[in-house]
């Protein structure tokens, strides 16, 4: 079996009303790797993460997505999720009428590794403890009235419960207090232990990025991947911002 | 300090001098008051109209006699149709030249600023005085595109007679309610507009209705037909001097918006406070068509006014923007009805209402999504502001949904001016009344900015006048 | 001989053609079946006796003909008095079980004395397929500083009519939470009229329903604010399946003098079949300026955005519908004692199992 977990080839994405957002992206994440996607606001990072799960707000105008060597470009959202792709949303959606508990139970049942009731409860309890989440949250409606930080923790809770193959974290660290960031790091570290899995982290947070093992960094500017490299790129951006890359895109578009 | 706030003379009674002037009735021809078959026949005879119209009038009269007044809504038991003169003919003929309009009538419209506005910003004007049109004119450039804008009675005998017959009171049948039936029996005056396919009328057309005669009713009929892809903005204004006897307005507006057509219909209603305004307005919108209503209700003693939109073709859209200001002695029951009758239709309703000095304002609406209106969207938002503790404001919406894959949202809120906001403005040197006026104008602003400029200014003036009465 | 009633009348009328001004029902005047309530739970500081004619509460709210019908027919008349200053956190449970073709008319007066706390659950249930008629009037009088949770669970048979009416009168700083769960019945009517006469009195009214099959659900909630700083919160939540119908009326009525009062009304309806019919009539009536009234409603099917979120977690549309149902049921079970929660399980198994969701 190949080492490739996710492969994106000549991948272009537009909004349903035909505004081009992502342009000809190429990117490969191997098993056991953690990648970081950085870029200025509005670059298209969330669009990329979301389109990897076939968000109906976007359409693929060109290219392919391969997951574990299988072409999933035409696959619907829930099918992709079942294959083991997980997206932690930048803005988790409020869903009145569905309790967090029913939702988790159902999501796990639908995952690649459905647990027995007992296993489910045990795992849930231990993760709640790790994430310092109160049990009462389970009976509340999904994300309804949750604070920004609580929503991010609930995303992490789902990630750990579902143990997907590929985790995409879209600014899961933003809006968290110091303790919560550390908890989140613990969660990420735990996930990284499994060398069959991979991760794509979208973040602006240098603290968190500096504390993680990172294999590759991609810089996305105006829908183009404009530079790639090791974690040294993170420090460069920390010091000089994105301007060097933005100029490059200007040249490219000209 | 903003300029609107510098006017100082304290006015205890609301100043309506701009609208509240009367003209002596000279040589007018008046039918006797009340409603009988005899009167209906007389009206018809005066108009020299086709036989089907007399038949329609008589059938409507019969329907009128069969129907009851509504068991909901404001009390209209004091309105006695036996005391209402249904037909008042001014002593003049319809003209396309202001100089031919009799001096006293011309002076009325001059004071209301109509000829002035016509010169500046309108593509055509119709002016009705009591029961008859006295002036109707369409700019040559607009007429050249094939646009028809004329008196509806005149058009009944012209090349569009058949089109009118096919549309007249088909959207609003006489059986709709008692006052639609009354309209069907005694209607008089009003305008007819036809815009041919793909013609865009760049400047608005306007009709102005003035009711001068005490104790009279006005029953004009407005029929607008937009063919495929046509585009029009139509403005309607109304006013009357105040009398001690009840006046009645039971007009009817029927709007046909063809495929891909776009119609905006703006009204500033400023009838005097002895008026019963029981007006019926309705639009039918075909595939991809867009209907926009902008409606300001300031006048009248009692109003029942709910412009209705029927979204009849796929992807048809409507937008209703309304404001109602109920002051002393007024009971204004206003709102809208939307019928989603085709897939992918969408509607947005946005209204504001204000109540002051014992005024009663009611927002009443109905949104219906029929079985076949899949993927339709409707959203209603209404906000009410209570300006003192003597007034009343009610919100009475109905949503009737018979289809699952739709999205219907409703939001309503009611309250008074935020004390903190008043305090903040006063801390910057505004008087309490100025602060409140500013806040009320801000509240109304999303609506007034939808109006043509002169009307927005007029609306702000009306609000200022109402507010100068002092807030309890 | 039957009585025709205009039930669940809207406090202010609107267009007749929408058929929302009232719900016309026909109730039987045959003698009631003999049904004894099974009363369990906290009874130490709560006295239950039969209602004597002499101590009738002033009738508040509700249509007179409806009240007259209940008064004339009620075979079960209980007065429940919660003693002054007593705190009864454990629920008092009144469980009514009906059999096929039973008719029951009940009148409950719940008197909450000053500063008392109570939790009262009334449940009426029958076999799934049972025919029958249940009608009641529950009159609550809450003295100053009293607090209570009143829950009404209705699991009548699927061929029956159930008509539950609650009126409440609240004195200074009294706080009542009323939860109606009209799950059973072919025709299920439920109403609450709360009169907030006391200063800072407050009422919360919750309704939860799941319309299925040909069920016809009709709700009417009215919060009348008289007392200054009184608050009300009306929340209606439901799912409609199959060919079910539902009409929900909610009214916040601010009377002159209720300075500083606030009222909220919200409705959330999930439509899961294209044969359902949903009507919503949320009124705000306002005769006082120093108030804040809000209403919000969302009616429709699963939105694209939440659906994408659920799908991204591997839950397809069908499963999503299922968990909406399960979430509702488990939320209801959580607020009920075990024996009543078990009834919800039975209902879920017997009634919802065949649902084409
Ligand atoms: N459905 C849509 N229709 C049109 N434009 C869209 C749509 N979704 C996103 N965009 C636009 O595409 C661009 C990329 O948005 P995206 O949310 O992916 O940015 P981002 O890189 O995640 O930014 P941030 O760092 O602020 O989260 C933005 O300009 C955004 O406005
Ligand atoms: Mg983003």
Image (cartoon, coloured by chain):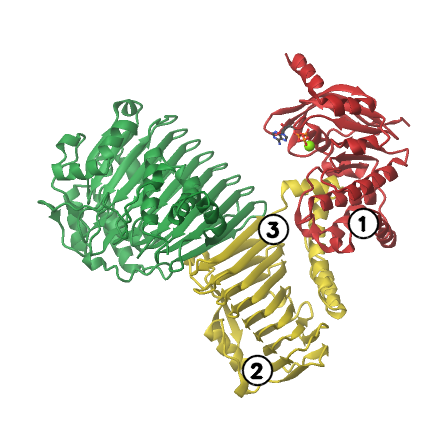
Chain colours: A red, B green, C yellow
Residue A140, percent across and down? Answer: 71, 54
The reply, left or right, for residue C116 in relation to residue B314 is right
The reply, left or right, for residue B140 in relation to residue A202 is left
Number of other residues with Cα within 10 Å of mark 2, as a class: few under 14, some 14 to 19, many 20 or more: few
Q: Farthest left residue?
A: B27
Residue displayed at 38% across by 29% down: B230
Location of residue B37 (image quadrant): bottom left
Residue displayed at 53% across by 59% down: C263
Q: Quadrant of the N terminus of chain B?
A: top left
Residue C125 visible in the current orientation: yes
Q: Which mark is residue A5?
A: none
Q: Chain of mark 3?
A: C
Q: Chain of mark 2?
A: C
What residue does disc 2 label? Answer: C31
Disc on the earlier residue, 3 or 2: 2
Residue displayed at 84% across by 36% down: A165
What residue does disc 3 label? Answer: C271
Q: Are labels 3 and 1 assigned to the same chain?
A: no
- Circles 1 and 2, Cβ within 8 Å, touching? The answer is no
């Amino acid at each position: 079996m190949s080492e490739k977990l996710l492969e994106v080839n000549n991948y272009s994405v537009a909004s349903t009303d035909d505004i081009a957002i992502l342009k000809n992206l190429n990117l490969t994440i191997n098993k056991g790797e953690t990648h970081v996607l950085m870029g200025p606001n509005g670059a298209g990072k969330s669009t990329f993460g979301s389109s990897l799960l076939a968000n109906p707000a976007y359409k693929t105008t060109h290219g392919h997505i391969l997951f574990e060597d299988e072409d999933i470009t035409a696959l619907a959202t829930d099918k992709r999720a079942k294959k083991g792709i997980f997206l932690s949303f930048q803005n988790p959606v409020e869903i009145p009428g569905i309790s967090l508990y029913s939702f988790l139970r159902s999501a796990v049942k639908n995952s690649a590794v459905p647990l027995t009731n007992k296993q489910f409860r045990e795992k849930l309890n231990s993760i709640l403890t790790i994430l310092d989440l109160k049990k009462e949250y389970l009976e509340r409606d999904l994300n309804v009235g949750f604070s920004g930080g609580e929503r991010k923790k609930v995303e992490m809770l789902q990630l750990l419960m579902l143990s997907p193959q590929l985790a995409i974290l879209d600014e899961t660290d933003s809006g968290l207090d110091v303790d919560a960031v550390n908890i989140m790091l613990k969660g990420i570290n735990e996930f990284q232990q499994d060398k069959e899995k991979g991760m794509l982290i979208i973040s602006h947070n240098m603290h968190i990025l500096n504390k993680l093992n990172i294999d590759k960094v991609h810089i996305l500017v105006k829908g183009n991947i404009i530079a790639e490299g090791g974690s040294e790129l993170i420090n460069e951006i920390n010091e000089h911002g994105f301007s060097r890359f933005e100029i490059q895109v200007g040249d490219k578009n000209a | 300090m903003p300029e609107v706030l510098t006017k100082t003379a304290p006015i205890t009674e609301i100043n309506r001098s701009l609208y509240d002037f009367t003209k002596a009735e000279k040589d007018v021809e008046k039918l006797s008051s009340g409603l009988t078959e005899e009167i209906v026949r007389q009206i018809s005879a005066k108009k020299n109209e086709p036989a089907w119209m007399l038949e329609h009038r008589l059938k409507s009269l019969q329907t009128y006699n069969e129907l009851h007044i509504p068991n909901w809504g404001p009390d209209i038991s004091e309105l006695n149709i036996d005391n209402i003169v249904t037909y008042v003919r001014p002593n003049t003929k319809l003209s396309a030249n202001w100089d031919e309009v009799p001096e006293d009538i011309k002076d009325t419209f001059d004071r209301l600023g109509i000829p002035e506005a016509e010169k500046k910003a309108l593509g055509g004007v119709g002016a009705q005085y009591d029961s008859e049109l006295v002036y109707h004119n369409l700019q040559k450039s607009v007429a050249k595109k094939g646009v028809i804008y004329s008196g509806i009675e005149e058009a009944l005998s012209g090349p569009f007679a058949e089109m009118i017959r096919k549309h007249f009171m088909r959207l609003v049948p006489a059986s709709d309610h008692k006052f639609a039936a009354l309209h069907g029996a005694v209607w008089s005056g009003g305008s007819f507009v036809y815009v041919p396919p793909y013609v865009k009328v760049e400047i608005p057309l306007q009709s102005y209705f003035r009711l001068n005669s005490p104790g009279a009713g006005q029953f004009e009929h407005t029929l607008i037909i937009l063919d495929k892809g046509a585009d029009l903005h139509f403005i309607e204004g109304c006013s009357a001097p105040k009398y001690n006897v009840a006046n009645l307005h039971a007009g009817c507006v029927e709007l046909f918006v063809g495929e891909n057509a776009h119609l905006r219909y703006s009204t500033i209603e400023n009838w005097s406070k002895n008026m019963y305004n029981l007006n019926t307005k309705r639009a039918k919108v075909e595939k991809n068509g867009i209907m926009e209503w902008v409606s300001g209700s300031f006048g009248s003693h009692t109003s029942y006014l709910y412009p209705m939109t029927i979204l009849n073709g796929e992807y048809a859209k409507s937008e209703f923007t309304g404001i109602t200001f109920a002051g002393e002695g007024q009971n204004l029951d206003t709102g809208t009805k939307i019928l989603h009758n085709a897939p992918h239709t969408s509607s947005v309703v946005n209204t504001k209402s204000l109540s002051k000095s014992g005024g009663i304002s009611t927002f009443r609406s109905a949104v219906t999504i029929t079985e076949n209106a899949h993927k339709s969207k409707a959203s209603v938002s209404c906000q009410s502001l209570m300006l003192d503790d003597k007034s009343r404001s009610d919100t009475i919406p109905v949503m009737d949904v018979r289809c699952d894959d739709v999205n219907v949202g409703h939001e309503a809120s009611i309250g008074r001016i935020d004390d903190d906001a008043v305090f903040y403005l006063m801390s910057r040197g505004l008087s309490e009344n100025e602060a409140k006026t500013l806040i009320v104008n801000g509240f109304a602003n999303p609506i007034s900015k939808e109006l043509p400029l002169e009307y927005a200014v007029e609306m702000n003036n009306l609000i200022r006048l109402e507010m100068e009465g002092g807030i309890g | 001989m039957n009585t025709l009633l205009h039930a669940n009348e809207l406090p202010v009328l609107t267009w007749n053609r929408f058929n929302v001004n009232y719900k016309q029902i026909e109730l039987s005047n045959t003698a009631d079946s003999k049904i004894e309530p099974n009363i369990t739970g906290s009874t130490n500081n709560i006295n239950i006796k039969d209602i004597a004619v002499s101590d009738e509460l002033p009738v508040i709210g509700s249509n007179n003909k409806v009240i007259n019908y209940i008064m004339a027919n009620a075979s079960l008349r209980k007065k429940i008095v919660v003693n002054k200053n007593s705190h009864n956190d454990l629920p008092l449970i009144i469980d009514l079980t009906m059999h096929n073709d039973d008719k029951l008319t009940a009148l409950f007066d719940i008197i909450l004395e000053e500063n008392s706390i109570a939790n009262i659950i009334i449940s009426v249930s029958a076999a799934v397929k049972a025919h029958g008629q249940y009608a009641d009037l529950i009159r609550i009088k809450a003295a100053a500083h009293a607090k209570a949770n009143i829950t009404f669970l209705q699991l009548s048979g699927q061929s029956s009519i159930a008509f539950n009416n609650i009126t409440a009168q609240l004195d200074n700083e009294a706080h009542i939470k009323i939860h109606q769960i009209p799950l059973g019945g072919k025709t299920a009517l439920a109403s609450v009229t709360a009169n907030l006469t006391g200063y800072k009195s407050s009422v919360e009214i919750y309704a939860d329903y799941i319309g299925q099959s040909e069920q016809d659900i009709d709700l009417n909630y009215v919060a009348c604010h008289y007392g200054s700083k009184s608050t009300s919160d009306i929340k209606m939540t439901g799912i409609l399946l199959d060919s079910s119908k539902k009409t929900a009326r909610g009214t916040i009525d601010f009377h002159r003098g209720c300075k500083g009062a606030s009222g909220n009304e919200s409705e959330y309806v999930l439509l899961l079949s294209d044969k359902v019919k949903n009507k919503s009539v949320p009124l705000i009536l306002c005769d006082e300026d120093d108030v804040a009234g809000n209403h919000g409603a969302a009616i429709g099917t699963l939105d694209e955005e939440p659906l994408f979120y659920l799908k991204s977690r591997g839950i397809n549309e069908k499963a999503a519908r299922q968990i909406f149902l399960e979430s509702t049921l488990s939320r209801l079970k959580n607020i009920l004692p075990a024996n009543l929660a078990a009834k919800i399980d039975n209902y879920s198994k017997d009634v919802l199992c065949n649902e084409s969701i």
